[in-house]
Amino acid sequence: MPKKTEAILAINGGIPAVTLTPPHHIWPPAPTEDERRDLMQQRELDIGIKGRVGPIRVFEELFKDFLEHQVQYAITFNSGTSALLAAYFALGIEEGDEVIAPAITYHAAVSCLYFLRANPVLVDVELDTWTIDPAKIEAAISPRTKAIIVVHQWGHPADMDRILAIAKKHRLKVIEDCSHAHGSRYKGRLVGTFGEVAVFSLQTNKLIFAGEGGILVTNSMEVHDRATLLGHYRDRSKNEVISKFYQQFWVTGYGLKLRMSPYNAITAIHSLAAAHTRIAMRKACLEYFSEKLRVFPELTILQPRTEVELGAWYGFKPRYDSSKFHSISRQKYIDALVAEGVDVSEPGSPAFSSLPLFTLKDDQMFRNRDTKKVYQPGDFPQAERLARESLSLPTFSRWPDDKKAMNQYVAAFQKLHDNWQELA
């Protein structure tokens, strides 16, 4: 523990510990000249979408390279949410079906099931990883259960051995949501290569980004064809759908247009090219930051399990335990850190048991919602504890340039730790 310092907290009129001008973490990184050139050339060449051609094809092939050729098919979409909808649809999830899902994550991993009139069956998560707790899954299985959605939350892979064993035993499909976990590995194997289908978001804040976009990967021809038809009518469906039965729908697809634009694909190509470098830099930053913050007993810092390797480290979310810090509330703690110049807030992903879409039976999406499962606060103690205790800090990514900001942040935490009486 650093030597105790006595100072007036900034929230009480003292000098802030962080002197750097915000923002302290800028994401996404600025485009390179090559990216600007390619975007301009595409504007002059073709701004339409004509199937699996041009930068869309290039990105999809490069993404399969990124996954070390462990997947046969890759299909881009206009968002990760659209890709998730396509994944569920492609697996045949329909009205009345149930999909087991974690009780806390970004809502889109689960909420699009409602559009298919299916039911997410929520189970609690593991406190140390934020990922679905395999020990809770079997009790949630019913005759209507068709699949398990696994989210590798904040980049930490879920316990895939146990989950896959349960899925095999009960003949369930496994969907991987890898939106937080580009490049993460479980026992040496990349996430996104375990289940029947996997989805990666390429939204602006992701390590591999397109601005808006998503990509679905699979080794199943059936999944490929159905996912293609859901969002890619005409050219792509005509040229890429393999099954003779599904091929006949090429003109119309299955009614939606969920395609990625060539501009987004170009941005994705360039962010993918820098992915391994950025993964290494982010890893160096956040391991350094984690080690510095572990000295504070009021904070619990993610400690990756020995069998996993975090890739993207999407999000840096320490837990704050007020019972270990003189019963000072999280909000008061955050307010004091903000006054010191720290960019910190509550995370934006509450437990689903607190959100109306998951707690109200009559949500007005469809006329008849009698079969909808609903939840209430108290149903998922671990997920709710994570939502109650977590802090959201910058996901520093520029090593070693960000050391100065991280050191000043640590100084702010130290200042609060040493002068807690001013908050009590």
Image: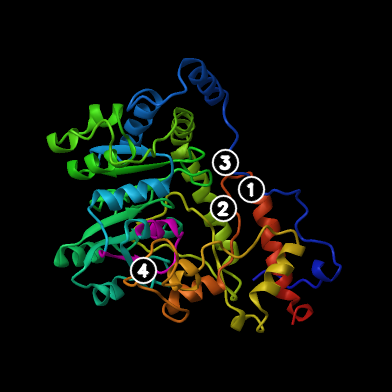
Q: Is residue 107 magenta?
A: yes
Q: CA distance from mark 1 to mark 4?
A: 44 Å
Q: Are marks 2 and 1 in contact (CB under 8 Å)?
A: yes
Q: Nearer the viewer, mark 3 or mark 4?
A: 4
Specify the quadrant of the image occupied by residue 321.
Answer: bottom right
Label 4 environment density (alpha carbons within 10 Å; few <14, some 14–19, many ≥20): some
Nearer to us of marks 1 and 3 is: 3
Query: Can residue 186 be seen here?
Result: no
**CA separation in Å, label 3 and label 4:** 40 Å
Q: Around disc 2, counting alpha carbons within 10 Å, would you say few (fewer than 14), some (14 to 19), or many (20 or more)? A: many
Q: Is tag 1's residue or tag 4's residue first in the polypeptide sequence? A: 1
Q: Residue at x 42, y 35 (%)?
A: 260
Residue appearing at x 68%, y 50% in the figure: 404
Marks 2/1: CA distance? 7 Å
Say which of 274 and 263 sits in front.
263
Q: Are marks 1 and 3 in contact (CB under 8 Å)?
A: no
Reading the image, the residue beneath label 4 is 369
> Which of the marked residues, 4 or 2, is nearer the chain's N terminus?
4
Looking at the image, residue 39 sits to the left or right of residue 413; the answer is: left
Q: Which mark is residue 28?
A: 3
Q: Amino acid at mark 3?
A: Pro
Magenta residues (range): 96-113
Mark identifier at residue 395: 2
